[in-house]
Amino acid sequence: MISIVEDYKPPFYDVVPNDPSFEDMRKVVCVDQQRPNIPNRWFSDPTLTSLAKLMKECWYQNPSARLTALRIKKTLTKIDNSLDKLKTDC
């Protein structure tokens, strides 16, 4: 297994100041409806693709369309179980 470590950058580093205020973040997330970028390389890995999909489903603008905590927990458990299966198959 080859791991890639990327430099850490906080979400919205390119559109808010280094120490953003609540108002800075409210504008970016609530008014402009921006969401953090997910690296394209995530979509070449099944586990990271599942995590990206889960993250996006938590970011819907309409709160009632977002996943429930129970659904998130079940999905994360399923992803974890699939990782365990991959480890035992290797």
Image (spheres, helix red, strand yellow):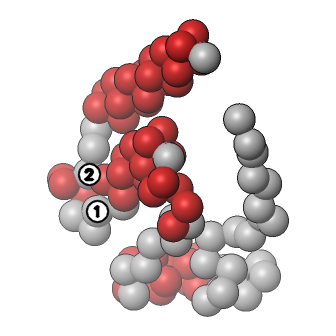
The amino acid on which the numbered mark 2 sits, given as a three-letter code, is Arg
The residue positioned 61% from the left and 78% from the top of the image is 12
In this orientation, which residue lies closer to the viewer: 67 or 51?
51
Q: Is residue 39 above or below residue 63?
A: below
The amino acid on which the numbered mark 1 sits, given as a three-letter code, is Tyr
**Which corner quadrant holds the C terminus?**
top right
Q: Secondary structure at mark 1?
A: loop
Is 1 on the left-hand or right-hand side of 52?
Answer: right
In this orientation, which residue lies closer to the viewer: 72 or 7?
7
Q: Is residue 13 above or below residue 79?
A: below
In this orientation, which residue lies closer to the viewer: 34 or 39?
39
The residue positioned 57% from the left and 10% from the top of the image is 88
Is 79 on the left-hand or right-hand side of 69?
Answer: right
**Position in image of residue 29 (x %, y %):** 45, 76
* Dot 2 or dot 1, earlier in sequence: 1
Q: Which residue is mark 2?
A: 66
Q: Is residue 21 above or below residue 43?
A: below
Extreme residue in the left direction: 64
Q: Which residue is mark 1?
A: 60
Q: Decide if residue 84 is in sight here.
A: no
Few, some or many residues within 10 Å of mark 1 (<14, 14–19, 20+): some
Q: Secondary structure at mark 2?
A: loop
Q: Are the residues flagged by discs 2 and 1 in contact, CB closer than 8 Å?
A: yes
Is 54 on the left-hand or right-hand side of 66?
Answer: right
